[in-house]
Amino acid sequence: MRTRTVVIAPDSFKGSASAAAVAQWIGEGWAERRPGDDIRRHPMADGGEGTMAALESAMPGVERHPVVVPGPTGQPVSTWWVGIPAPDGSVTGLVELAATSGLTLAAPAPLDAGTAGVGHAIRAALEAGVDEIAVAVGGSASTDGGAGLLTALGASIRDQDGRPIAPGARGLAAAASLDLAGLMSPPPGGVRILADVTNPLLGERGAAAVFGPQKGASPADVVAMDRALAGFAGMVGVDPATPGAGAAGGAAYALLAWGGRMTSGAAFVAERSGLLDAMHRADVVVTGEGRFDEHSAHGKVVGFLMDAATSPLLLAAGGIAAPTERFAAAVALSELSGSVAAAIADPEPYLREAGRRLAAAFPA
């Protein structure tokens, strides 16, 4: 049996297992079936929850910096940002919105949740002297257009009586003036906005309409939030139709106003973790996610690898609800376990079995 170089690069299985754990268990199952293969694990993320963890587990030299910030509804949140070193000695400060202003950090508060926390984490990275900022914007609890983020970085947003606005979309609806004179300058290497969506800020595909209901917003809330975002866009002046501006309840829009540029989160993680180089030397690439469906090909980790991998590509997914012709082999954990619930509750044995089956399906 010829030794193969196997690159295992899954996303996390949301609510079930981290990307690092998924890669570990698939790799262990593969090694049971093909013990001589050279297995390279590259946990992945797409700019949402788990992006920092994926790079911490995949790269040497990534340094964690603890910080306490206000959470989405103002409560203190102990979190961190990470410094990612480059060969030239520069450091990228990576901040994860889900870990500072994320939906999992508080009970749903669609009109009142804000993004001040991610702004404070960005400020901490700037004050530490990073050369570049990258913000993973997935998983937001808020639809405030990034107003809280900008305020934490020194902007002033006031109502018609000259008072600072309250947090969240409710406060944004009262905004009458925006002053960016006190805004901190971006670092010399600029600002990257890591996202997996291309939605604009406003309208039927915008931040409020598409993502608001996921955060607990009612139909009336969605209308109010979209109106507040439109008023804010009129003050900011950046084109609200910019693809990706609606990511994270419009936090991406605020970062665009700060000079940021949209970047595929999956591509960023793949480049910085060395996955792109590893794939060039691989005989086979294995990826995975919690549910493979029609959305997977658009900005997600699996979709990125479907485009980028030149070696045979294999898939392990919690559930499969879309055609898998792109893959040389595919395994659904829900079929191995008998149900989606069983696969979510205890994914380890089924990921190991998926690794064994994918190894067996790949030609010797």
Image (cartoon, rainbow, N blue to C red):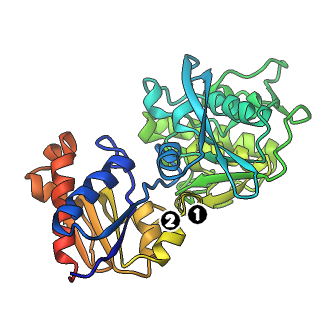
Query: Residue at point 52% right, 34% down?
Result: 99
Name which residue lies at 75% across and 52% down.
89
Q: Is residue 56 above or below residue 181?
A: below
Mark 1 highlights which residue? 271
Q: Estimate the x, y position of residue 281 in percent, counting from the top left.
A: 46, 77
Q: What separation in Å lies between label 2 and label 1 (alpha carbons)?
A: 6 Å
Badge 2 vs badge 1, beta-carbon distance below 8 Å: yes
User: x, y (%) of residue 129?
Assistant: 80, 38
Q: What amino acid is labelled 1 in the image? A: Glu
Residue 351, by quadrant, is bottom left
SS for callout 2: helix
Give the amino acid at mark 2: Leu
Q: Residues within 10 Å of mark 1 (few under 14, many from 20)?
A: few
Which residue position holds label 2? 275
Q: Nearer the viewer, residue 40 or 117?
A: 40
Q: Residue at x 63, y 28 (%)?
A: 117
Report whether 125 appears left or right of 41.
right
